[in-house]
């Protein structure tokens, strides 16, 4: 079993470290955030992620998983160093590599000869090559091993992946990294650095494009009396298309799709190629969010001002407490601009949120919906199915329902007295 350092205890770093310890490796996860590390040492994880708490605590008990402050302390004796530092977007869409590069600078002197630096964070194509140059150490290898972890399913995605991508300079380096995953049953795709880096961006941009496509078809369904759920099923059985990522929504978001799509478009522009399809995908998603907000506004009786809008769901999808680039919040921004009173409920958000302070956050779905002129469902939380919708229909001022996730059945909702608008249904 290998000695591994993981630099960065965010979503990617923590999941990577905990799962590698689960596979039997000796893992030390480092971060600069002292309170975060102290909480992790006590087995407390800083965000909502199913199963992660259990495997972190198993790792701590078996002494296979440790948490330290400062990357140097983790890397000094390790053979493999997973770099899981944030790579946020700059305003022009390019990737800000400053955290990433300063992390590498910090550890470069303490790395053991013959150890391997592995980039796990999503980085632009060309990063591994420039890292190798930055390191100025011929005795250290650099390998790209992108993550494909979806929040809310990250542990499962790590331990049962669809594939493992390893980009390396030599077959021997690739094999050493592949060895870390020997207990995992998945195809290993070995490539050069650049292809591995591009695979990650391409996967996210492709999925974003697929979602924009289905959101556009949902709009067409609304104008032609077709049903998007039937259309999605009818195309999803075609293995060339595939059934996943065909659920329409308020628009795609999160900490990865928007950032990675913009980064890939920027990379293309820099390479002298105008990636029109991707640029339009990004633009159409913005328009789709606006269209979703318009649906809600159109449900409000026109003559009354200062109406109450109730919104269920604030996170960018169900199963997480992550509000980063949440389409739910983007939709609410449009609604706030129209001077309505907005009340929101989300199972993982219990306090006012800085991203949109005008929205009053309630911790109870019934209080949130009371006296509302319209209720909009923005995230596909299963918890919403547990709510007594008959009661909701009674306590709302006007039982108008905009279901941007098609969580409820139109006929059932209409029976309860709602005026119902879904997405493409
Ligand atoms: C995404 C990818 O799915 C992961 O493979 C990748 O590793 C990760 O980014 C990353 O780069 O780190 P994540 O951001 O957690 O994972 O989100 P997804 O579950 O893919 O959802 C992205 C957006 O698409 C959300 O807003 C979601 O609501 C929306 N979506 C997804 C739909 O509207 N409909 C669908 O059918 C699926």
Image (cartoon, rainbow, N blue to C red):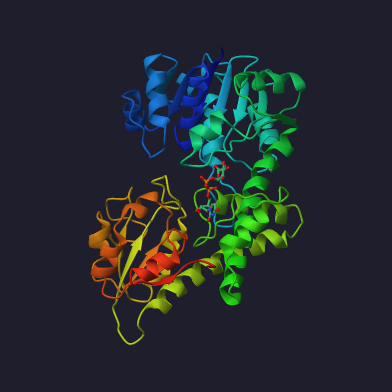
Residue at 56% in and 20% down: 109
Q: Position of residue 95 (x, y in %)?
A: 59, 47
- Give above or below for 217 relative to 46: below
Along the line of sight, which residue is nearer the eye, 392 or 283?
Answer: 392
Q: Is residue 108 left or right of residue 353?
A: right
Q: Position of residue 366 (x, y in %)?
A: 25, 60
Q: Position of residue 128 (x, y in %)?
A: 67, 34
Q: Is residue 140 visible?
A: no
- Give above or below for 299 relative to 32: below
Q: Quadrant of the N terminus?
A: top right
User: Which quadrant holds residue 98?
Assistant: top right
Residue at 54% in and 38% down: 149
- Give above or below for 192 relative to 401: above
- Give above or below for 26 relative to 269: above
Residue at 51% in and 29% down: 16
Q: Is residue 108 left or right of residue 414?
A: right
Q: Is residue 195 visible?
A: yes
Residue at 65% in and 28% down: 186
Q: Is residue 61 left or right of residue 279?
A: left
Along the line of sight, which residue is nearer the eye, 170 or 161?
Answer: 161
Along the line of sight, which residue is nearer the eye, 355 or 70?
Answer: 355
Q: Position of residue 171 (x, y in %)?
A: 76, 22
The mark tally for this picture is: 0
User: Which quadrant holds residue 234?
Assistant: bottom right
């Amino acid at each position: 079993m290998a000695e591994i350092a993981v630099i960065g205890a965010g979503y990617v770093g923590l999941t990577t470290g905990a799962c590698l310890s689960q596979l039997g490796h000796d893992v030390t996860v480092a971060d600069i955030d002292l309170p975060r590390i102290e909480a992790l040492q006590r087995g407390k994880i800083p965000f909502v992620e199913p199963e992660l708490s259990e495997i972190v605590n198993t790792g701590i008990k078996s002494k296979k998983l440790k948490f330290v402050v400062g990357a140097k302390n983790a890397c000094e004796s390790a053979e493999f160093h997973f770099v899981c530092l944030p790579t946020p977007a700059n305003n022009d869409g390019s990737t800000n590599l400053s955290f990433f590069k300063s992390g590498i600078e910090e550890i470069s002197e303490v790395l053991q000869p013959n150890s391997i630096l592995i980039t796990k964070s999503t980085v632009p194509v060309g990063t591994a090559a420039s890292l190798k140059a930055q390191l100025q150490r011929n005795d250290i290898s650099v390998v790209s091993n992108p993550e494909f972890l979806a929040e809310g399913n990250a542990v499962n995605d790590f331990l049962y992946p669809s594939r493992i991508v390893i980009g390396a300079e030599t077959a021997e380096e690739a094999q050493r990294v592949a060895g870390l995953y020997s207990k995992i049953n998945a195809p290993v795709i070995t490539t050069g650095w650049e292809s591995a880096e591009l695979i990650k961006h391409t996967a996210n941009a492709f999925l974003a494009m697929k979602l924009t496509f289905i959101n556009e078809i949902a709009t067409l369904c609304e104008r032609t009396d077709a049903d998007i759920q039937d259309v999605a099923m009818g195309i999803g059985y075609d293995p060339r298309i595939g059934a996943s990522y065909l659920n329409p929504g308020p628009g795609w978001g999160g900490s990865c799709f928007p950032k990675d799509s913009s980064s890939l478009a920027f990379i293309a522009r820099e390479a002298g190629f105008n990636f029109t399809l991707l640029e339009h995908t990004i633009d159409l998603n913005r328009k789709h969010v606006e269209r979703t907000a318009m649906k809600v506004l159109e449900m409000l009786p026109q003559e009354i001002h200062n109406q109450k809008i109730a919104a269920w769901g604030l996170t960018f999808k169900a199963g997480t407490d992550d509000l980063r680039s949440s389409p739910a919040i983007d939709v609410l921004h449009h609604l706030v601009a129209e001077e309505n009173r907005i009340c929101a409920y989300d199972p993982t958000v219990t306090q006012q949120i800085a991203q949109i302070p005008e929205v009053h956050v309630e911790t109870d779905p019934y209080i949130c919906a009371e006296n509302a002129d319209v209720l909009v469902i923005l995230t596909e939380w299963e918890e919403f199915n547990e709510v007594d919708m008959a009661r909701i229909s009674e306590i709302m001022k006007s039982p108008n329902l905009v279901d941007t996730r098609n969580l409820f059945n139109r006929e059932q909702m209409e029976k309860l007295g709602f005026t119902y608008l879904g997405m493409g249904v």
